[in-house]
């Protein structure tokens, strides 16, 4: 990361952070003693960010412009709003999941399933010559509700993680949580499963750890959201739900995300918002 400025004026630093983020630049803030430091997450934005700060200081806004209601946004404005909330890898996975759902539901159900399922032969048989199958079940979804739920949380959690730590970190977290959660679900129940929710719970676990006792962190999540997600996971182990849940994928995904969060937090303990 690149430090853009350091100031004891917290209002100025936080206002600049918000302005830079609205401009699509990934920034975060750390606390050092009585001062706040504004950091740029991705070096490729450095020239643009420094020029933005120079102009911002030369002509500070009298007040922050209010955002237009989402309902009043046109298609282009809506796209720009969504684009600021995620990076390229978040977009790519989102698109692949949607395309896989279209193929699975409307074009070639059997063919899609045969290529993306964890084990093409069923039972406890693994095809070691096709290593992509350890990841590809995350692209399979079996209902519209299942698909929408997972895509929403992928965008919300994956997008934040990518903007904060970069695409490489999100790719690594996605692959690790996908492999571990898919393997656990296959081992416990066989190959007839799918969904992005193991990764979603991995992202949740990652966010919980890196933002623990850091309410200023970009991945800090509202307590109500955490209660809902953990409660939903626990409900999957009861007979109260009307859907079949990939309980092992959720649990192992969460645990692997927590492990990765601990690894990164110990390596980069100073990252804060």
Image (cartoon, helix red, strand yellow):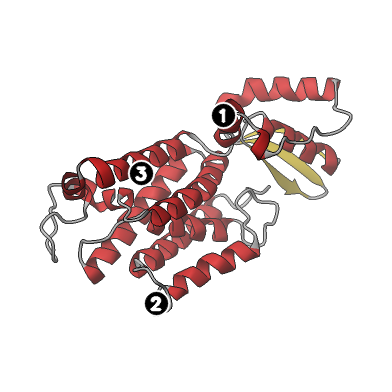
CA separation in Å, label 2 and label 1: 41 Å
Q: Are the residues flagged by discs 2 and 1 in contact, CB closer than 8 Å?
A: no
| Residue that carries the numbered disc 2 in the rendered image | 237
Horizontal side of residue 4 vs 77, given as left or right: right
Q: How far across and down, in percent of the image, does residue 61 sit?
A: 85, 27
Question: Label 3, on which residue?
Answer: 97
Q: Is residue 24 above or below residue 36?
A: above
Mark sitting earlier along the chain (3/2): 3
Q: Is residue 3 visible?
A: no
Going from the N terminus, do you reach mark 2 or mark 1 first?
1
Residue at left offset 30%, top offset 51%: 140
Q: Earlier in the sequence, mark 3 or mark 1?
A: 1
Indicate the position of residue 233 as horizontal and vertical percent values: 45, 69
Separation (CA) of disc 3 from disc 1: 22 Å
Q: How many marks?
A: 3
Residue 82 sits in quarter: top right
Q: Nearer the viewer, residue 160 or 268?
A: 160
* Residue plotted at (29% across, 59% down): 182
Label at residue 75 = 1
| Residue 124 in the image: above or below residue 168 | below
Q: Cβ–Cβ below 8 Å for labels 3 and 1?
A: no
Residue 184 lies, in percent from the top left, at 29, 65
């Amino acid at each position: 990361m690149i430090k853009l400025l350091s100031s004891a004026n917290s209002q100025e630093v936080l206002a600049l952070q918000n302005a830079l983020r609205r401009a699509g630049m990934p920034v975060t803030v750390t606390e050092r003693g009585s001062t706040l430091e504004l950091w740029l997450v991705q070096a490729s934005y450095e020239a643009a960010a420094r020029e933005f700060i120079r102009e911002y200081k030369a002509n500070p806004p009298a007040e922050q412009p209010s955002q237009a209601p989402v309902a009043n946004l046109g298609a282009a404005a809506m796209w720009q709003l969504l684009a600021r909330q995620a990076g390229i890898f978040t977009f790519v996975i989102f698109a692949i999941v949607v395309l896989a759902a279209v193929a699975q539901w409307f074009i070639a159900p059997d063919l899609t399933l045969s290529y993306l399922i964890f084990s093409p032969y069923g039972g406890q048989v693994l095809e070691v010559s096709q290593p992509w199958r350890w990841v590809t079940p995350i692209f399979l979804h079996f209902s519209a509700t299942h698909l929408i739920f997972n895509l929403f949380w992928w965008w919300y959690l994956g997008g934040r993680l990518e903007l904060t730590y970069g695409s490489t970190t999100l790719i690594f977290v996605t692959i690790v949580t996908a492999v571990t959660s898919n393997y656990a679900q296959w081992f416990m129940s066989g190959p007839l499963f799918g969904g992005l929710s193991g990764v979603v719970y991995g992202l949740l676990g990652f966010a919980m750890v890196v933002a623990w006792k850091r309410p200023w962190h970009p991945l800090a999540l509202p307590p109500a959201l955490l209660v809902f997600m953990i409660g939903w996971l626990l409900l999957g182990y009861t007979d109260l739900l009307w859907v079949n849940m990939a309980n092992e994928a959720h649990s192992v995904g969460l645990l692997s995300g927590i492990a990765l969060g601990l690894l990164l937090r110990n390596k980069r303990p100073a990252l804060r918002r």
